[in-house]
Image (cartoon, rainbow, N blue to C red):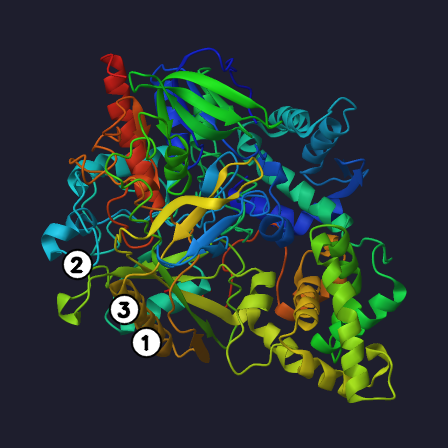
Amino acid sequence: MTHFEFVRFLQEDCQPVYTILSQAGKTIVIAKPGCTSKFASLCRGVASSLMNPNPGNDLDRRRFLLTALRGAGGAWASVHWPAILEAAQHAAHVRDAVPPAKLEVLSAEQAAEIEAAACRIIPTDDSPGAREAGVIYFIDRALATFAADQLEGYVQGLPVLQAKTREMFSSIPKFSQASPDQQDTVLKALEGQPIFELIYEHTVMGFLSVPERGGNRGKVGWKQLGFDDSPAFAPPFGYYDRGDGT
Amino acid sequence: MNPQVTYKPSEEVDFVIVGSGAAGGVLAKELSTAGFKVVVLEQGPWIPPGEFSHDEIKVFFERQLTNDSRQQPQTFRKTPQDKAEMHNGVIYGRLVGGGSVHFTANYWRFHEIDFVGRSRRGWVPGTGFADWPVTYAEMEPYYTKVEWEVGVSGLAGSSPFDPPRSQPYPVPPMPVKSSGVIFERAARKLGWHPFPAPLAILSQSYRGRAGCVHCGRCEGFGCEVGAKSSSLASVIPVAQQTGRCEIRAQSYAYRVETNPQRRATGVAYFDARRQAQFQKARAVILSANGAETPRLLLLSSSPHFPQGLANSSGLVGKHLMINGYHEVYATFEEPLNEYKSVAVSRVLHDFYELDPKLGFYGGGGLDARFGMTPLSFGLGALPSGIPRWGKAYKGWLESYSRTMIVASHAASLPVEANSISLDSELKDAWGLPALCMTYKDHPDDLKTVSYLNDRALELMDAAKARKAWTRPVHEQSFAVHLLGTCRMGNDPKSSVVNAHHRTHDVPILFLCDGSSFVTSGRGQPTMTIQALAFRAAEKIATAARRGEV
């Protein structure tokens, strides 16, 4: 099997051939029963190694995997086993892609204010925006993880957002209760201020980062970009490198 | 992590090497295969390739692969007269494999001029511009060795400006990308000479390693399939297989010890539990990168060496060079899908040596590339005139798949005031004095970058880009290329190491990494760092066999 045949296998045959489950931190690869693909036995070999109850750590798991693949594919597998592992992990990520849509850090009221702003930064029109991408769930998870030190920025900043709303539209107590046009006016007035920049950066991040982080649901942000997250590609990559290239 | 020998710190090994990156990995492989006992102290963790992630937040925001300013904060100032402010300007790989894990893998050899620019072109005011004590001709066999031992793809003879070479590349160049086709057509139209990028990335299986699967998570990321020729994927496994080399991760060196006879006796380090340890060795090699190597020497001052180890010249940490870099963005009608495959597929060196009549010293290369992840594009690529939020911003995001970059890579001149030093107040999480970076681009460096950037705009104009944009050239305050801070030379008064990487002051202390550079080349230093490491290993092994370490 050549390199590009393998790549094609990853792209086209992989998903129907096996299902990926993630349990207790272990990746399990299972060939579907009755699958007649020439790769099925390979996948079963991977599966048996990964389902071995013994592997206590990644090193052991990889060693089992390597052993199984040597049996399944000989020299070819020893060269390509990392790619197979990579594909398996990628598939596991896809499986894990949608964390539950619930708030852990932010209150419902804080979330409503932030989401209202996020939805003006990346609005919904004929394609999904920040709301459909679940940006607010990304932000909530971020504040529980890598951006925990930025929670204070929201605690301090959301009252500024509300105060600016009241200042500009006296009858409206909350940003999320303003009309979209009014919201845009408030946000324009706050551009450059810490609360705007915080929501702005987190909104873009939540729209475009990996779905495992809680946003970019259904990969709607990546669709907006035209970005394909397949684990492997083969040339031609784009329009201009088709044919004889140069 | 492969099975490997382990040594007790109290056991005197032949060599302790600080750093497991581009240089340290090569030295570990060469010295262990030559029969020596080697311990490599790596401050970062050992990350198995299967744990390399496509998650930009993990890689860039949680700093999976690079130094973390929350643990190791830094300061920055433009000149020694300024007060240094908190700013994390020095970015380096902090894991087994070092910066070679996440690098873009551009492997240009230096040209002859890079070694002898001072005598060919004369001194440049405000600099410590000097020739190297080695020439390209002496380095050529080691460049070839890098290409074959580490694994570099490319096409020999494809650039008329390339210096002579003794061997072709071991594997063919990577497939051309759409950016490369556009770049090549436009460059030819202008009479320039584009060629396939030489990359330390395998285009096909080589020495038991897999070829690239073009996943596109390349620049800035670790390679899960081992096709990127990092030290982690290429030389470190060979070192381990000798049964004589231990790579000791999470070992943060903080002092090189010397005895009253001024001989280095080993390296003190903090282990993973932050306990102080001391590894005894017959000889010490620092390959900790062009920021951490001088820092470690400055941290190792003693009554014999009051201004830092090996620093009688006063030049440890000085002459920092970081290379100029600038980008032109361009969008086209049809999808390029530059997020696929490696970052770069075409380069040109027509401006490697700029005409002296321009009135400044410099030179560099241009390449067609795209290192933009979805996140970096969304947050950092916006042209002026496009709103940064709202419907228009969202619409602009669609141009991601139709965008490419032409990057300028340029020489930095060695300026003595540009330096790595110890901050007088700030400490890291281990209580050690923090890095302070002092840097102000030499005026000629800024002129060089502006000149190259104008050529990049000209190129995208010739390519009939729908839109091309750039930002004004400005002084730099971030450094990923860390060069020149323990420069090599024959005179102990004007250099830190000799032509064999031995420090002038401490006979069994060797320094080999970007710090050894005398000039910066034209923007792609890692190939030369590794060629120096192969050469240094040969010289050091010969000396050791003669009992001279």
Asked if marks 1 and 2 fall on the same chain, the answer is yes
Identify the residue at horizontal 75%, vertical 48% (top origin): A16
Give the residue pinned by disc 2.
B124
Q: Is residue B256 left or right of residue A64?
A: left
Badge 2 local density, few (<14 within 10 Å), some, or many (20+)? some
Give the amino acid at mark 1: Glu
Q: Is residue A167 above or below residue B111?
A: below
Taking depth in this image into account, of B181 and B532 the one nearest to the observer is B532
Taking depth in this image into account, of B539 and B473 the one nearest to the observer is B473
Asked if marks 3 and 1 fall on the same chain, the answer is yes
Q: How far is the residue under mark 2 from the one under mark 3? A: 14 Å
Q: How far is the residue under mark 1 from the one under mark 2? A: 28 Å
Give the amino acid at mark 3: Lys
- Numbered disc in front, either 1 or 2: 2
Q: Is residue B148 left or right of residue B134?
A: right
The x, y position of residue B274, in whole percent, is 59, 28
Q: Which mark is residue B458?
A: 1
Give the residue pinned by disc 3.
B447
Identify the residue at horizontal 19%, vertical 66% (top origin): B360
Q: Quadrant of residue B242?
A: top left
The x, y position of residue A1, in whole percent, is 55, 39
Q: Is residue B308 above or below residue B183?
A: above
Give the amino acid at mark 2: Val
